[in-house]
Image (cartoon, rainbow, N blue to C red):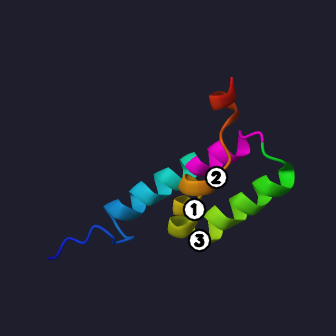
């Protein structure tokens, strides 16, 4: 049985799911406009891995980090 770090099934899938849930909550709590939030939410929801990576680079900051 070969272990593949990029596998999106099993443990890798659970990690990606947890990260995506964290990102979705962060997007909802951000100070971005509702339109921008909707675009980010759709991106992360429909393209979980790619959306997460793009969010890490260019995503809106959470409201907690501005307090």
Task: Identify which residue is drawn at 78% across, 58% down.
Answer: 38
- Check whether the beta carbons of the residues at disc 2 and disc 1 lie within 8 A of each other: yes
**Along the horizontal axis of the image, is 50 left or right of 60?**
left
Which residue, given by chain and number where applicable, does mark 2 sit on?
59
> Which label lies toward us, 2 or 3?
2
In depth, the one of 12 and 52 nearer the eye is 52
- Magenta-highlighted residues: 23-31
State yes or no: residue 60 in magenta: no
**Along the horizontal axis of the image, is 1 left or right of 62?**
left
Q: CA distance from mark 2 to mark 1?
A: 7 Å
Q: Quadrant of the N terminus?
A: bottom left
Q: What SS does tag 3 mark? A: loop
For marks 2 and 1, the one nearer the N-term is 1
Give me the disc on residue 47. 3
Which residue, given by chain and number where applicable, does mark 1 sit on?
54
From the top left corner, tell me how far across and down residue 32 is, in percent: 78, 45
Q: Quadrant of the C terminus?
A: top right
Q: What SS does tag 1 mark? A: helix
* 38 in relation to 31, above or below: below
State yes or no: residue 26 in magenta: yes
């Amino acid at each position: 049985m070969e272990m593949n770090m990029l596998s999106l099934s099993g443990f890798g899938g659970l990690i990606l799911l947890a990260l995506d849930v964290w990102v979705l909550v962060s997007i909802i709590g951000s100070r971005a406009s509702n339109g921008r939030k909707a675009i980010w939410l759709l991106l992360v929801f429909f393209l979980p891995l790619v959306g997460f990576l793009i969010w890490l680079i260019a995503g809106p900051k959470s409201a907690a980090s501005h307090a």
